[in-house]
């Protein structure tokens, strides 16, 4: 069972909050002011990986931050740790993705960095998965991200710079028993990131995919089934936030967290039959 960030339930499309107090600055100008890096929009920012990404960007300093999530109280608490504006909304509701993009572009200015981290999971046998849960996982994990990128990418291309960072999952690379639809959703995002990267090549815009394995967040509690395996051990959300930051400063296309997960992914690619036999035996 593997991880992507989760969302919490609360009323959608609530009023926005103004930026909170300034967090610890990072890089500075010669006169001591934080160097302006640009505007970053983070979805799934109310907890888990999304919140860790917000804290990392705030610590680096110089970012104008826009945060999205459904849980207003938690989103507000995260924004209080950073200079951030919040736009609470359920991105699966009609028009919510467009309104979020318009808010970021009109209220804050251009979006230089999009970290698409909103997502949910569902665990159990596919034959018992309710149709409503299937629709929700696909809507949240795939469609909401694709639609938001569709609104923001043309502005990045026109500006000749920017980066889209998509939070995927190791489940989308190899497929995980008991998470068929979640694996399919994250696999779709991985392919979307690859195809989009080819399309924007030469425009100055980058597309990155961060692929975490098991992450120590409330994700597993919210999906209804806790993480019970002894291995691999969950990593802190901050390690994923560090990987997101590396995609920004180094222009990385793809990063696994932890890095050793690249090995089983390569085994599956090079010897899929062997990988499937091992996966069937060891889970």
Image (cartoon, rainbow, N blue to C red):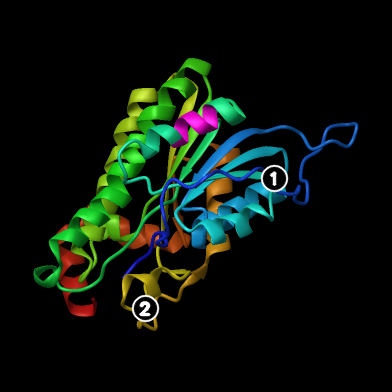
CA gap, disc 1 to disc 2? 34 Å
Q: Position of residue 57 (x, y in %)?
A: 64, 47
Q: Where is residue 154 in the image (x, y as percent from the top left)?
A: 41, 21
- Measured along the vertical axis of the image, is residue 262 above or below residue 202? below
Most distant residue in the top direction:
158
Whether residue 84 is visible, yes or no, is yes
Q: Number of callouts in the render?
A: 2
The crowd level at tag 1 (other Cα within 10 Å; few <14, some 14-19, many 20+) is many
Q: Residue 153 placed where, x, y %? A: 42, 27
Q: Mark 1 points at which residue?
A: 83
80 lies left or right of 246: right
In this rendering, would 279 be left or right of 195?
left
Q: Which residue is drawn at the image coordinates 38% and 37% (left, top)?
A: 97
Secondary structure of the residue carrying tag 1 is loop
Q: Is residue 205 magenta?
A: no
The answer to whether residue 202 is above or below residue 92 is above
Q: Quadrant of residue 148?
A: top left
Image quarter (top left, top right, bottom left or bottom right) of the N terminus: bottom left
Query: Which numbered dot is residue 227?
Result: 2
- Whether residue 268 appears in this view of the structure is no
Which mark is first along the chain, 2 or 1? 1
Q: Which residue is drawn at 46% across and 73% down?
A: 234
Q: In which quarter of the image is residue 6?
A: bottom left
Q: In front here: 210 or 118?
A: 118
Residue 60 rendering spot, x and y as whole percentages: 70, 46
The magenta span reads 100-105
Above or below for 138 versus 41: below
Give left or right: position of 176 versus 117.
Answer: left
Residue closer to the observer: 253 or 36: 36
Q: Is the magenta stretch mostly helix, strand or loop?
A: helix
């Amino acid at each position: 069972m593997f991880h992507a960030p989760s969302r919490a339930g609360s009323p959608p499309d609530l009023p926005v909050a103004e930026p909170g107090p300034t967090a610890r600055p990072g890089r500075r100008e010669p006169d001591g002011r934080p160097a302006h890096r640009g505007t970053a929009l983070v979805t799934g920012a109310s907890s888990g990986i999304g919140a860790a990404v917000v804290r990392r960007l705030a610590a680096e300093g110089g970012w104008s931050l826009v945060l999205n999530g459904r849980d207003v109280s938690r989103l507000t608490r995260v924004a209080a740790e950073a200079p951030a504006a919040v736009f609470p909304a359920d991105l699966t509701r009609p028009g919510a993705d467009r309104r979020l993009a318009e808010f970021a572009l009109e209220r804050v200015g251009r979006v230089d960095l999009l970290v698409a981290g909103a997502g949910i999971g569902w665990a159990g046998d596919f034959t018992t998965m309710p149709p409503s849960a299937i629709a929700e996982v696909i809507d949240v994990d795939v469609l909401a991200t694709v639609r938001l990128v569709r609104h923001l990418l043309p502005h990045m291309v026109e500006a000749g710079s920017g980066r889209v960072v998509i939070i995927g999952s190791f489940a989308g690379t190899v497929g995980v028993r008991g998470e068929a639809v979640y694996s399919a959703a994250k696999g779709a995002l991985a392919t979307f990131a690859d195809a989009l990267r080819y399309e924007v090549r030469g425009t100055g815009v980058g597309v990155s995919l961060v692929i975490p394995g098991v992450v120590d967040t409330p994700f597993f509690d919210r999906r209804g089934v806790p993480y019970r395996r002894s291995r691999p051990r969950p990593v802190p959300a901050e390690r994923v936030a560090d990987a997101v930051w590396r995609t920004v400063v180094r222009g990385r296309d793809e990063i696994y967290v932890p890095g050793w997960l690249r090995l089983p992914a390569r085994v599956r690619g090079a010897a899929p039959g062997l990988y499937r036999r091992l996966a069937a035996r060891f889970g």
